[in-house]
Image: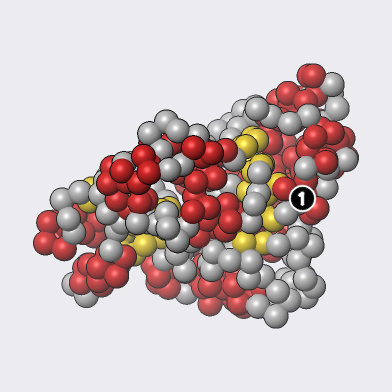
Amino acid sequence: MTLRPDQLRSQIRETAFSFRGYNTTNLGRTSELLAHPVYASTVETTLREFSALCSDAVGRHVDLVERVRHCRETRDLTTYAEDVALIVGVEMAQLRILESQFGVPFTEARMAFGYSLGEAGLLIASGMFDKDLLRVPIVLAEDSVALAYDTTMGVLFSRGTALDIPTVQHMCTKINLLGNGIIGISTFLSPNCVLLLGQRETVDQFKSLMPKFLPRTATLRKNPYRWPPIHTTITWQKAIPNRAAVMLQTIPGGMDEPPLPIVSGVTGKESFTPHNARELLHQWVDHPQKLWEQVVHVLSAGVKTVIHVGPDPNLIPATFKRLADDVRGQLNGNSPGKIGLKMVSHMVRRPWLASLLPANAVLLRAPILRHINLEDWLLDSALSG
C-alpha cells in the first residue's frame, strides 16, 4: 500500500530514503519523467547540469538528455562514466520534483542511506557536499573500468548457518598469496550472503577451496557481468583510493553537519560528521559495503516507510524483500503480532536468522515495512492528481 502526497508529508519523520548504486541497467522510467508535461523541465535541467559536469570531467561531450530521450540503456562498461552521472542526476531530479511539486523535502526524513555510488548521490542531494563530489568517481572511472575487465563477481551464500566471515577472509588471503590476482569481499548483503570480487581465476580458486573450509550449505555463484572492483583492495593497483583522497581535499563541502542522519556504507552507522566526512569517503573506495548493517539500522530506528530513489532501484529493495520473506518463513505465516512458542519451534528452519533474533528482534519488522519506488510514485501521483 502506497501513500498519498499528504500522507507522505505527514509521515516524513518515519521515513528513510535509500539511494541506489550502479547496475547493468540504469535508465528505469526516466524517459517517462522526461516526457511528462509537469516534470520535464526539472528532469531536463538537472540532466543538463550533470551532463556538463561529466563532460568537463572526462574531456568529451556527454548529453544525458539525448540519451534518455532515445532510451539508450547501458550496454557495457564503455559508458560507465556517464552512467555514474546519469544515476546521480536522475536521483537529484526525482528529489527536486518531490519537493517542488509535492512539498516533501527529503532532508526532513528520519534518515537516509546509499549503496555504493548511491552514497555519493545522497551526500550531494543532502547538500553536505557540492555536486563536484561526483567528479571523483567520474575522473577515476577509466581506471576502474580497466580493472573490471578481468574481474568476476561471485555471490557467496549459505543455506544453513551464517557465513564464517573470518574464514572467508582467510580463504581470500590464501588465494592472494599465490600472486595470480586479488579477491576480496565487496559487500556484506546479510549474515549468510556476501559479494566477492576477484581477478582472473581467483573466484574459481575460491570455489575449489570451499569443501575444505566451508560447510556444504555454502554455495558460490558467478555473476556473468563485469564490475568495477570498487570497495575492494583491487583498487590499490591503480592507486585509486589515494588519488580519490587527493581530489577530496579540494571538493567543496563536508564542513557542516548533515541535515539528516546519514547511515554510512563503510560503518553501517550514522557516522558522517564535519570531522570525518572526507575520511569516510576515502575508505568508501576500498572498504566493503556494510549493507546488512545499514538495513538493520533502519529497522532499529522505527522507520515505517523506505523510499527508494533513482532509476529502477534494485539491490536495496531486493535485500529488504529477501529479509522480509525469510522472516515470514520463520514465522510460518503468522503475523508479527502473534509471535510465540510456535515461532521458536520453527527457528531451526533458518539457523542463521534464528541465531540473530534474540539480539536483533528488530528484524521482525521487515515484513511490515512499506516500500515506495520513487519514480513509480511520482508518475502514479501525477496521474491520480
The total number of labels drawn is: 1
Location of the N terminus by quadrant is: top right
Residue 174 place in picture, x, y as percent: 20, 72
Residue 40 place in picture, x, y as percent: 81, 30
Q: Which amino acid does label 1 sit on?
A: Arg
Whether residue 340 sits left or right of residue 88 in the image: it is: left
Farthest residue, direction left: 212
Whether residue 214 sits left or right of residue 51 in the image: it is: left
Whether residue 320 sits left or right of residue 206 in the image: it is: right
Residue 85 place in picture, x, y as percent: 65, 49
Residue positioned 57% across, 38% down in the render? 368
Q: Quadrant of residue 59?
A: bottom right
- Give the answer, above or below, for where 35 lies relative to 279: above
Farthest residue, direction bottom: 275
Q: Quadrant of residue 261?
A: bottom right
Residue positioned 77% across, 25% down in the render? 381
Q: What element carries label 1?
A: helix
Nearer to us in this view, 370 or 24: 370
Residue positioned 73% across, 31% down in the render? 3
Q: Quadrant of residue 275?
A: bottom right
Asked if residue 241 shows in the view, the reply is: yes
Q: What colouring style does the render use?
A: secondary structure
Location of the C terminus by quadrant is: top right
Residue matched to label 1: 13
Farthest residue, direction front: 341
Mark 1 nearby-residue class (10 Å; few <14, some 14–19, many ≥20):
some
- Give the answer, above or below, for where 252 lies relative to 331: below
Nearer to us in this view, 129 or 321: 321
